[in-house]
């Protein structure tokens, strides 16, 4: 059942659940952050509308800078601006920022501990027909390896808005991962959000008279949290499933991860990203050193993306409900042998 403590959208399992692009929440968050702090500025690399910086540009044109198609310059200029006390947000497609300008982010921003916020839009294979050149599948891996960098992967537009506003208040560099397509709105204004804190979205139902115990934890991030919830709902009469929304990839909420691993004894990670170096790797690194349990990883398996519809590609790469269900069955088999 849905965890009542986190006050999720009651229509989360409805066919007509509201769907909004995650990147839209980022655009709304920029305006809120800008209204609260006049030091917030936004820089973009010629993708103002696509990256949703258009909202901030229209509200605060004097605090918006169009850099043009020059992502390395985007990072360098933002670092310099932050040295004057400003709070810069830079945004582009994730393949270009942090993809193209990774060294500038590492050296001019993180190495100098500048509180620049980097938003990478159009991540994952759900970018769709733009194809493999524009589908960022490696961004969490390259960003979480940078010292001082916070890495956030919101599950929906509301969470993206909250993450953006919260990021503006931090004194560290932050990377926010955004998706292009419309995503089911799972959270509400009342759903807790805190950088570095995961939330348990789904638990076995204690009131169904079966005294069902948790048997497996799905730790998911980004838009695929909804797929994980759908699978948990489908299997709730067969398997005791816990679903964790792991919004912050770095720093990890080690307490929650350790708790669900101990309670269930089996973990499946779900992400729209390469398995190598991604969220699943981060969870595995922690659990292998602290509480090893059988694990399965749902993610892209050392492949590039390609053109197709978002849903076609999610299924092709095994990221959909069938892929998650197969991973659950496999990890339970390993757990019980």
Image (cartoon, helix red, strand yellow):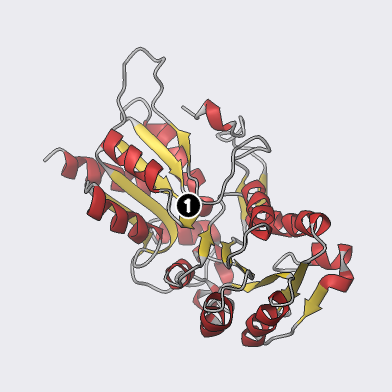
Residue at numbered disc 1: 221
In the figure, is residue 265 to the left or right of 166? left
Residue 58: x and y in percent read 87, 65
Question: At 35% across and 12% down in the image, what residue appears?
Answer: 209
Question: At 41% across and 22% down in the image, what residue appears?
Answer: 205
Residue 91 seen in this snapshot: yes
Residue 324: x and y in percent read 36, 47
Number of callouts: 1
Q: Nearer the viewer, residue 72 or 194?
A: 194
In the figure, is residue 303 to the left or right of 222? left
In the figure, is residue 138 to the left or right of 238? right
Question: At 74% across and 76% down in the image, what residue appears?
Answer: 84
How packed mark 1 is, by other alpha carbons closer than 10 Å (few <14, some 14-19, many 20 or more), is many
Query: Which secondary structure, mark 1?
Result: loop
Q: Quadrant of residue 88?
A: bottom right
Residue 321 seen in this snapshot: no
Q: Nearer the viewer, residue 72 or 312?
A: 72
Q: Nearer the viewer, residue 294 or 174?
A: 174
Residue 114: x and y in percent read 61, 73
Q: Quadrant of the C terminus?
A: top left
């Amino acid at each position: 059942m849905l965890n009542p403590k986190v006050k999720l959208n009651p229509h989360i399992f409805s066919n007509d659940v509201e769907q909004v692009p995650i990147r839209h929440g980022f655009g709304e968050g920029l305006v809120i952050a800008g209204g609260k702090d006049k030091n917030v500025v936004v820089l973009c690399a010629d993708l103002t509308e696509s990256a949703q910086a258009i909202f901030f540009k229209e509200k605060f044109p004097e605090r918006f800078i169009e850099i043009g198609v020059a992502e390395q310059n985007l990072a360098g200029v933002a670092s310099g601006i932050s040295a004057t006390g400003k709070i810069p947000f830079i945004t582009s497609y994730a393949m270009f920022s942090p993809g193209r300008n990774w060294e500038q982010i590492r050296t001019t921003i993180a190495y100098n501990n500048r509180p620049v916020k980097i938003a990478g839009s159009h991540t994952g294979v759900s970018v769709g027909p733009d194809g493999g050149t524009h589908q960022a599948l490696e961004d969490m891996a390259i960003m979480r390896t940078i010292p001082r960098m916070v890495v956030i992967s919101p599950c929906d537009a509301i969470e993206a808005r909250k993450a953006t506003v919260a990021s503006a208040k931090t004194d560290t560099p932050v990377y926010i991962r955004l998706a292009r397509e419309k995503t089911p709105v799972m959270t509400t204004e009342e759903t807790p959000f805190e950088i570095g804190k995961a939330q348990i979205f789904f638990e076995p139902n204690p009131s169904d008279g079966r005294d069902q115990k948790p048997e497996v934890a799905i730790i998911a991030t980004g838009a695929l949290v909804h797929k994980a919830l759908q699978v948990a709902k489908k299997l709730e009469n067969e398997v005791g499933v816990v679903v964790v929304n792991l919004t912050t990839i770095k720093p990890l909420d080690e307490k929650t991860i350790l708790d669900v691993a101990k309670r269930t004894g089996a973990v499946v990670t779900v992400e729209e990203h390469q398995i190598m170096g991604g969220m699943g790797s981060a969870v595995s690194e922690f659990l292998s050193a602290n509480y090893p349990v059988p694990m399965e990883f749902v993610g892209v398996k050392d492949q590039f993306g390609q053109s197709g519809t978002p849903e076609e590609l999610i299924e092709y790469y095994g990221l959909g409900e069938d892929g998650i269900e197969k991973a659950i069955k496999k990890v339970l088999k390993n757990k019980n042998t």
